[in-house]
Amino acid sequence: MSRVRVHNFSVSIDGFGTGEGQSLDAPFGHAGGRLHEWFFQTRTFQDMRGGAGGSAGVDDAVARTWNAGVGAEIMGRGKFGPQHGPWEDHGWSGWWGADPPFHTPVFVLTHHPRPSVEMAGGTTFHFIDASPQEALRQAREASGGLDVRIGGGPSTIRAFLAEDLIDHLHIVVVPIVLGRGTRLWDDLEGMEQRFHIESVTTPSGVTHMTFTRP
Amino acid sequence: MSRVRVHNFSVSIDGFGTGEGQSLDAPFGHAGGRLHEWFFQTRTFQDMRGGAGGSAGVDDAVARTWNAGVGAEIMGRGKFGPQHGPWEDHGWSGWWGADPPFHTPVFVLTHHPRPSVEMAGGTTFHFIDASPQEALRQAREASGGLDVRIGGGPSTIRAFLAEDLIDHLHIVVVPIVLGRGTRLWDDLEGMEQRFHIESVTTPSGVTHMTFTRP
């Protein structure tokens, strides 16, 4: 059976996976880039955006595992864009430009489905109004037998964790207190009992936690 | 100037410093002993309770710094006991038996002051209805020029952090999701900017974070 994986998902020490006040200029709201500075510094991130350089230590090694063996992604609407409610037009095709880094089918969870959007490089965005189970069924069908990544944001990951649908969870705890935004861990009391957990702090100051099935 | 220190304060990954439902049999409510298993295993803890054995690795080394140079402690009423409202009697003298491990004056914050209680071994409990600043003034006066420890619980530490009164903060992040209880980090947005932060995960699986003045 293909696995369901989460990678490189940052949270603040007070548990927020994104800040308050998302907008076109601030995908993570008032958090800005603070949750992802550790990632921006990695060679993995530079590779994704076609840049050069970047660190090649443990942050990079762990970050790099995000894509191998993944055949589809599921993301919440907030990861796709800042719009709410019915789509005013279909011009928006995500934050990532013409060639998004996914290169697979991507299922965007929304109560307002719209036609699929085929991008360069193999990424196709599908818009579905579906439960976690049904979204996962569709993503698995489209994944060619490979794993499915749950891409975020926090509400989406939380919904899949609540249904016990995640096999591999990589969380990066960043030592900042965001104070407001969307929490990852709410209503997940005792979830740690379902996983083997490993933590390591790297020189960038973040703590990588991996939750895997025992 | 003497410093104000917090040591060995455990929080869950969802940020709770204690569980829900404190009672005589459950000082940390539904959290039970789960926030402190790392500590129970240390030689420091065994020494405090007059036992033998225990680990002598990094958990123990960090835990052991809790007491040196401390001349007084301030604690919230919930750390002292499970009672609420006016004291029904003065029989309760804390969870620690006849010889508490503090061996200094201890100031218990409560809206219901009562006579001080002198215990064996140098611990005296004073009960004061005071702001963080006023409590700190009294504790400093009683500390003989040494440091003052803020002993918890989470609401008390949070109140002192909110007033920027803490110089050294040692937090232990335990990989469990408590789901309910009292949060440490609420209303402290941006507090990390006042500190130099260092994190390390130890083989017990917890992550020690130290926040010190730059």
Image: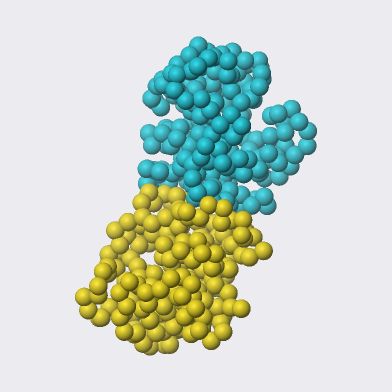
Chain colours: A cyan, B yellow
On-image quarter of the C terminus of chain B: bottom right
Q: Residue at x 54, y 14 (%)?
A: A90
Residue that lies at the very extreme toward the left in this rendered image? B88
Q: Say whether residue A52 is visible.
A: yes
Q: Position of residue B202 (x, y in %)?
A: 56, 58
When the figure is inspected, residue B7 is found, relative to residue B196, above or below; the finding is below
Q: Nearer the viewer, residue B156 or A208?
A: B156
Q: Position of residue B38 (x, y in %)?
A: 47, 62
Pick the residue in front: B35 or B41: B35
Q: How many marks?
A: 0
Is A46 on the left-hand or right-hand side of A32? right
Q: Residue at x 32, y 60 (%)?
A: B29
> Outermost residue, right direction?
A52
Determine the residue positioned at 38% across, 57% down. B182
Instruction: Determine whether, in the image, residue A72 is placed left or right of residue A194.
Output: right
Q: Is residue A201 above or below residue A159?
A: below
Q: Which residue occupies 66% across, 22% down? A: A97
**Quadrant location, the N terminus of chain B:** bottom right
Residue B33 locus on image (x, y percent): 38, 62
> Does residue B156 appear to the left or right of A206 in the view shown?
left
Q: Which is nearer the eye, A47 or B146?
A: B146
Q: Is residue B56 visible?
A: no
